[in-house]
Structure formats: C-alpha cells, structure tokens
Amino acid sequence: MKQLIATRLFQLVAVVLIVGSISFALMYFLPGDPALRIAAGRYGPDMMDNAISDMVRAELGLDQPVLFRFLAWMGDLIRFDLGHSLVSGAPVLHEIALQLGYTLWLAALAFVLALVIGPLVGAIAGLFPGSIFDRVSLLVAVALRAVPPFVLAIVFMMVFGVTLRWFPTAGFGGWSNMVLPSLTLALGLAAMSSRVMRDAMSEVAASPYFAHGRYKGLSDRTVVMRHGIRNASLPVVTYLGLQMVYLVEGVVVVESIFAFPGIGHALVHAIIARDVPMVQGTALAMGGLFVLLNIIVDLMCLRLDPRLGRRAA
Amino acid sequence: MTQSVLRNLCASAGILALTMTTGFSAPVMAAADDEVLDIASPLEISGLDPAKSGYVFSRMQAAETLFTVNRQGQLVPMLASDTHVSDDGLIWHIELRDGVEFHDGSAMTAEVVASDLKRAFDRPGVLGRAPITGISAEGNEVVITLSEPFSMLSAFLAHYSTIILAPKSFDEVGDVTAIIGTGAYRVDEVIPPLRVGMSAFENWWNGKAEIEKVSYLAVSRGETRAMMAQSGDADLVLSLLPVAVNQLNNDPSVNVEIATIPRTRLLKFDVSKPFFDDVIERQALSLAIDRKAIAAVVMRNVDLAATQMFPPSIVGWNNQQIPAFEFDPQKARDLLAEAGWVEGSDGILEKDGKRFSITLRTYASWPDLPLIATALQNQLKAVGINLEISVGSYTEIPSGHADGTLEIALITRSFSMVPDPLATVMADYGPGGADWGAMNWNNDEAADLLAALGRTTDSAVRADMQNQLTSILQYELPTIPVVWSELAVATTDKLENLFVDPFEQNYYLSDLRWVK
C-alpha cells in the first residue's frame, strides 16, 4: 500500500508539472492579443480599448520573452507561489482556495448522491435481470446520459425551482442551493454506474459462490450483502474513479448555469480573459484532485478485494 | 427470490427521497419570504478596483461619485454641492456636500476626495482622458486645474471609476481591499465574482434606505435570471433577454419594466476600403437594411429599429429634424450601380475585378448580435453584397481596428458610460475614428464641432451644435446604426417604487420598498 501511495504521489508531481506546462503552452499559442483579453476581463467591453490594453501590457510585462515568463512561473511554483490573477489581482492560491471549496462541496455531494442512486438501482436491476424494473432503469439511464447536463439543469430548475419551489433555482451559500446542481451532476454519474453495477450484480448473482451461499442456508439478505454487494461493487468503484472526468466537465457547465462560484466557473472565465496564472492554478488543482481521488479509489479497491494487494506484493 | 432484499432496498430509497424532500423544503420556503432584497444581474465582480467593478457598487448605491444623472437625465451634483468654474474654464472649484460620512464612520473630506481622484486619474479609466493638470484640496473644495477648457469634466466625475472611497479601503500600495463608500448601503461581504451582501447605512446623508438587507448575485445566464424572477428567488432581476420579457409579462406575480437605453447596435467599417470609401456606398448599405424586421424578430420590439444614431431617450442628441433611415433595396441597388458596382455572374456585385465580398466580425457575449448578423447577411445578399460572418471575441474588434484587418463589424456601443454622450461621440467620431467608433473617417466639420462642444458648457449653444453633428453622422454614415436597445427589469409583486434608469447609473435601491 505504501508503494502504491508513493507511486501515486510521484504521479501527482508529474501531473502538476505537465498540466502547468501544457496549460501555459496552450494559452500562449491561442490566437489573439493577450493584453486585449486581459483588459477585457478586467474592465469589460465598454471600457476596453487598445490604449487600456497597452497599459495592461506594460504593467504585466507581456512583452517579455515567453521562455523568461515560463521559467519565472516554474521558479514560483517551486516556491509554492502560484502568482496573482491578472484580472482581479488577488493571489491565485487565495482564489483557488475559495473557489475549490465550493466545487469540492458540490462534487462531493454529487458523488455521494451518485453512489447512493446508481449502485442501488443497479443492484436491484442486476438481481432481477430482464424484469420491468431492469428495462425501465436501462431506458432512464440511457436518457439521463444522453441529455447534456445543461438541459437537465434547466429542466430541474423549471420543475423544482419555478413550479414546485422546493429548491432555489440558482445561487449559493445555503445547503438548499446545492441540491439541484449536485443532482444534475449525480444523475449523469449514476446513469452509467447503475448499468455497471447491474451487469456486475447480474454476473455475481449467477456465480457458483453466490448459489453456494444460498445452498448452505444463508438468508437472501446475508447472501446479497456479504457476497453480492461487495463483489459487484469492485468494478463500480473503479468506474466511478474514471467518472471524475465527467464530474470535472459537468462542474464547468453546471456552475455557470446555477451561478455557483466554483473552480469550473473560474476556469472558463480565466481562459476567456487569458488569465494564465489562474488557468494554470485551476488546471493544477483539478489535475491534482483527479490524482488524489484515484488514490482513494485504489485504496477502496484494495480494501474491497484484498487479493489485489497480495498480487501486487 | 430475494423479495426481502428488494423490500429493504426500496425502503431505503424511499426514506432517502423523503428525507431529501421534507428535510430540504422547509427552510427554502422560509427563505423565499425573507426581508432581504435579492438582486440577480448579469454583471460579475472582476475585482474591487473601481475601474473594474465600480459600476456594481455605484449602481447599488454602496459608493457614490461627485456627480450623477437624475431621473430626468440631467447631470446633477451628488457628493458635490456646488461648482465654480473660472472664466477661462481652466480651474474647477468643486464644493463638497457637508456632513457626508463613510461607512466606517470617517468623514468625507476634500483631502480624501482629491486623493481618490488622483488615484483614478493615474489608473485606467475615463479621468485620464481629461486634460487635467492638477487635483488638490482647498478647505471644503476640490480644485481641478485643466490645460484647456473641458465641458465634460462633471460628467467624467459621474463615471464609476471615480467613486469616492474611504482611506481604509486601500492597502499600503494603493490597491482596493474593501469597498467603504458613502452610499445608502454598506457592503458587508463580497465574494468575487458573484455575490455582494449589503445592509442599509444608518447615517446616509440622504436618509436611511427603506429596505434593510440586500443580496446581489451575478447570474450570467439569461434563462437562469428569468427563472429566478418566476420562482421568486430574486426580487429584482436586471437585463432580461427579449425572449424572457414576453414570458414574464404573462406571469401575474412578476412586474416587468422596460426603458430604452443609450446603447446602439451598429455597423462599424473601414471607410478607407473600396467597399465603403464613397458615401453613396454607405448610404446604399443603410438602405438595404430592414431595421424594423430585425427589431421585431430579434429584439422583439419593432420600436427599437434605429431611425438615427441616438434613441429618443437621449435628450439633446436625438435629432427630430433629420429624416429617418429608410429601407429601400431598389434604391440601394441604384446607388451601388452609381458607385460603379455591377452584378457578377453569381449575383454578387463587382467593381474593377473585385467582388463585394466582405467579412463581418461580431461576438456572442451579446446573444442577439450573431442573430442580427445573420439577418444582415440575408438582407445584404438581396442587393448583391456577400457577407461572411465571423463570430469571435469582442477583443477582435479593437485589434482589427488597430492592425487594419477589420472590414466590417457588428458591435454594440453604449453612449452612457460617461453620462454625457459627447464623451463617447468625441472619442468615436473624432479625426480617424476609434476602436469602437468610426474607422479611417475624417470630416473637418465634425472635428470642429466636436472640439467646440468640448469647450462649451452653454446648453443652448451645445444643442445647436449637437444637431449639426447628428445631421453629419446621419448623412455621412461613418457607422451605420441598426437597432437601439432596451433594459428590461423584472420585480416580484411584493416590491414597489421601482425606477429603471436609462443611463444605468443607479438602481435606486434606496427608494424601493416592500408592498405593505
């Protein structure tokens, strides 16, 4: 296990360097004048013009050679200094800490909801393959996965916000504000994980050890909980780790629609405004988060299936 | 088999769903009836510096400027009380209002105001464009010296980048760390880029505001803002999309107010290019545009079809004496023929072997612009002009202007950033034009009028000169106005006394009150 963690931490450092360098290069090669974009991000379309962008260029030293700016960034990174936002002027670390906090809450709630909904529906469908429940859950899962998150978000806002008035349509600050955005994200995740769980559960239910458990007199509940859920959840947990990509992608869209101040919202604005330190900072945070979550998934898999640890040893 | 398992799983799901709905719904319903004024607006807070997001804090009456625009559209003192200008127009003595207190309890003195204005002058913003040579404090007055007479100084001092903040708003290097203003509302919290929380300031010089608490949320998406109005999550929703206005008009719990604002969607083009160098070519282009159709379909209000550059709401600049723009495609074809353009084999006009095929740049940050561009593409094709549309960032307009690659662009231009349209007109239609105005257009008569207007404060003299200038713009067409704009604002029926400011300087929150 220690070796696994050490390997993953090494990967984390590699991800940080690669993601930072690639995001720097991508921002550099994007067409258009970065000074104009930054001026637009700071002062808005009605105030922004070439004179103001020249002031921004001089202030930020955007005329300096690109290699010099890249090495300066690397030097700052080694000192754990991510710099200042070129738009707001605030330290990137401070901005990310604020925004990432909201995103983590949102992502965590979505993840927990997905964990509850997906495997639960999948387990029932897997125990009764070919039943009406199985077929309906397949239909719903396909529909939820096919519908883009922004459409799902608007439907939820109309139904639960405007018509039923159960939850706020947008905004942040209270736990009730988290429900619709996290549900939007969770259902996309749950749609897929339910099918993975369904197939895994169906396979486990048909396995000799499952039948053996019942033949030796264990109750249905004990057989499912002891031999079914644990064995079937292994591919689901692995799959949910991969689904983090969907979560990151979904967060960007969902935060904008629900006026939620997360890291996805910050990243989109930073890219539009060519706020390179913010782009690098948010990309680093997202990349790092992805590695960390995968470490957790690996550890969960080890816990669920101790044979994996013995094989590695 | 496993019926009991199924029962258990279903029961778990049921309990979870019940917990979610019953547990979550109670506090939310309570929140919807609270006494906090919830505002939803598209404007995000990109930073605390006045030049960046000062408009949010000035419109919400957290911070104030020396001058402002009143409900009649007139420029009037706000934190200033009186102004005396020397005979040569070079020294302005601006007397400050007595007894004004900042939100931290400190007094607004001439020294503080002079320091704030010097800071605004040195940083990006409008004040740097004024011919200011010095700013100082004398007793209860701020004295501004100029290198030449400048009639728009008081309008510049109404711009949000010149809001007056307490000394404790700044850190040791002069960066803004808090908004401590003099307005009706004290800023309690700012969570950039989306939220501002405020509460009524007891010692506001104009009396305490009616509503105690205000919560501002930046909501960039128009659909979300409309739904917040319908659901009652927002009491005041600003900048509704045209499509949402009809929808909300049918909702009895929502009131919609609309004002025509000094913002025009217009075509900007390089007058030195062979497509636009002859005035009759520009007139033909204008005649080919069916503005009423665009206004009716895209803007959802036929009255927004531009008849001239300035809408009737801009008193002194809307010229009643000039003929309105017409839609006459046949006349457009005739004028283009007169300019030497002949129809090619594919129906597109040609002159000296060059096709009348041009690229129109526009941007999607105003959702209607790409739609208008598509309509223009069809309408101009009918007179033999091929328009390729390029939708990108709005920064491509000034960059295309600077490097000369811009052929034609569809833009939106506000004439109320400084609440005297002359400031924008002078920048945009002076010799050579400007990033957001004419391009390579030079007109000596217009240049002389602009220079004279910049020196003149006499309103009668100015009115005559403004009429001459708008006549030139109407005939010469250095840019071609297409449609005007409106500001649609929605309120819940529990709020009253709303005023929609066409100059977008003030939301007048201090006048709002709950319906008893």
Image (cartoon, grey):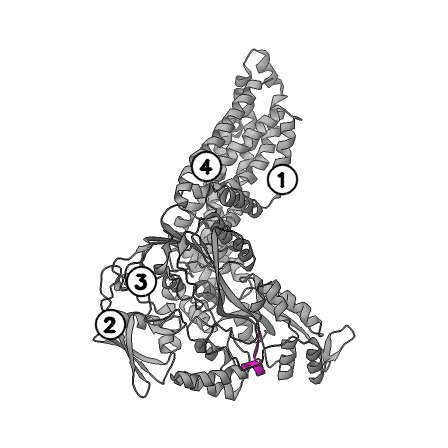
Start-end of magenta stretch: B473-482
Outermost left residue: B139
Return the chain for callout 1: A
| Residues tagged by mark 2 and mark 3 found on one chain of the structure | yes
Q: CA distance from mark 1 to mark 4?
A: 38 Å
Q: Are the residues flagged by discs 1 and 4 from a single subunit?
A: yes
Q: Are marks 2 and 3 in contact (CB under 8 Å)?
A: no
Look at 52% across and 67% down and name the residue there: B485
**Could you tell me which secondary element the residue under label 2 belongs to?**
helix
Give the alpha-carbon distance from disc 2 to disc 3, as whole Å: 17 Å
Residue for badge 1 = A143
Note whether B88 is above or below B173 in the view shown: below
Mark 1 / mark 4, whichever is N-terminal:
4
Q: Mark 2 or mark 3: which is in front?
A: 3
Chain name for mark 3:
B
**Which residue is tagged 4?**
A5
| Dot in front, 1 or 4 | 1
Instruction: Give the residue at mark 2.
Output: B110
Q: CA distance from mark 2 to mark 1?
A: 65 Å
Return the x and y of residue B37 as percentages of the image width and height.
38, 52
Left/right of residue A305 with respect to residue B326 in the rendered view: left
Q: Callout 2: residue from which chain?
A: B
Label 3 belongs to which residue? B183
What amino acid type should be assigned to the residue bearing mark 2?
A: Ala
Q: Label 1: few (<14), some or many (≥20) within 10 Å?
A: few
Instruction: Tell me if label 4 and label 3 are in contact, CB under 8 Å.
Output: no
Are callouts 2 and 4 both on one chain?
A: no
Q: Secondary structure at mark 4?
A: helix
A127 inside magenta stretch: no
Rendered view: B167 above or below B83: above
Q: Is residue A266 above or below residue B268?
A: above
